[in-house]
Image (spheres, helix red, strand yellow):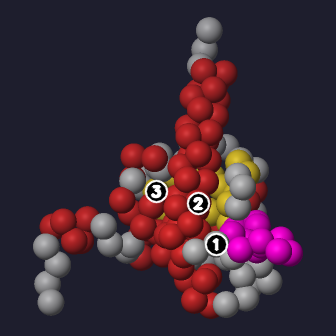
Amino acid sequence: MSFTKTQSRFRFSRASRLLKPSQFQAVFDARKACRGQWLTVHRYQPGQPRACSKNEQTDTLESVNPTSRLGLIVAKRLVAASARRNLIRRVVREYFRTTPADFPPGDWIIRLHESPFRVKKGDISPTRLQVVTGLRRDLSQLLNRVASQIVREKQASAPS
């Protein structure tokens, strides 16, 4: 089966992923994070200065990539069922692929810090559709906040 242009445009290629632990650490070292209801978004823009160790010299060239790259962290301790963890990953990857304008060039890590499947005693557990809609809404709100942070940082760093 061959991919047409529209299908390959939405692929989550290897170049679009953070793969090595040192790449994840570079994003965490930037200390740019925004926390939502269930997700936390960490980002590293290529123009940001950051200290790098001797081991990271090879990864520095990769992190100056002009495209956006994504790393996902969905902890097993938060969501025990693998099918549910995979659902969360699919939703976030789909959002990343279909809305590239929301992710400026740089490295991004999206981490689950609270389970969307957790319910209080006596409450009804959420449906799959409610979880997917909630994750998309949370991610959309987070990225809007990140975009406004980026604008404020650019205004603050611009010469007066």
Identity, as a three-letter code, of the amino acid under mark 3:
Ser
Residue 145 is situated, as x and y percent measured from the top left of the image, at 62, 39
SS type, badge 3: strand
In this orientation, does residue 49 appear? yes
Q: Which mark is residue 68?
A: 3
CB-based contact (under 8 Å), mark 2 and mark 3: no
Tell me if 2 is positioned left or right of 119 in this view: left
Task: Give residue 158's position: percent from left, percent from top.
Answer: 59, 19
- Cα distance between the residues tagged 3 and 1: 32 Å
**Residues at discs 2 and 1 in contact (Cβ within 8 Å):** yes
**How far, Cα to Cα, is label 2 from label 1?**
10 Å
Give the label, 2 or 3, closer to the camera: 2
Quarter of the image with the C terminus is top right
The residue at which mark 1 appears reads as: 126
What secondary structure predominates along the stretch shown in magenta? loop
Q: Residue at x 57, y 89 (%)?
A: 83
148 to the left or right of 28: left
Instruction: Name the element at disc 1.
Output: loop
What x and y, as percent, mark residue 50? 71, 49
- The residue nearer to you, when weighing 38 against 59, is 38
Q: Would you call the spot at circle 1 few (<14 residues within 10 Å), some (14-19), or many (20 or more)?
A: few
Q: On the image, numbered disc 2 is attached to which residue?
A: 134
140 sits to left or right of 152: left
Which badge, 3 or 1, is on the more N-terminal residue? Answer: 3
Q: Which residues are magenta?
A: 112-124
Give the quadrant of the N terminus: bottom left
In the image, residue 131 sits, relative to residue 63, either above or below, namely below
- Between circles 3 and 1, the one closer to the viewer is 1
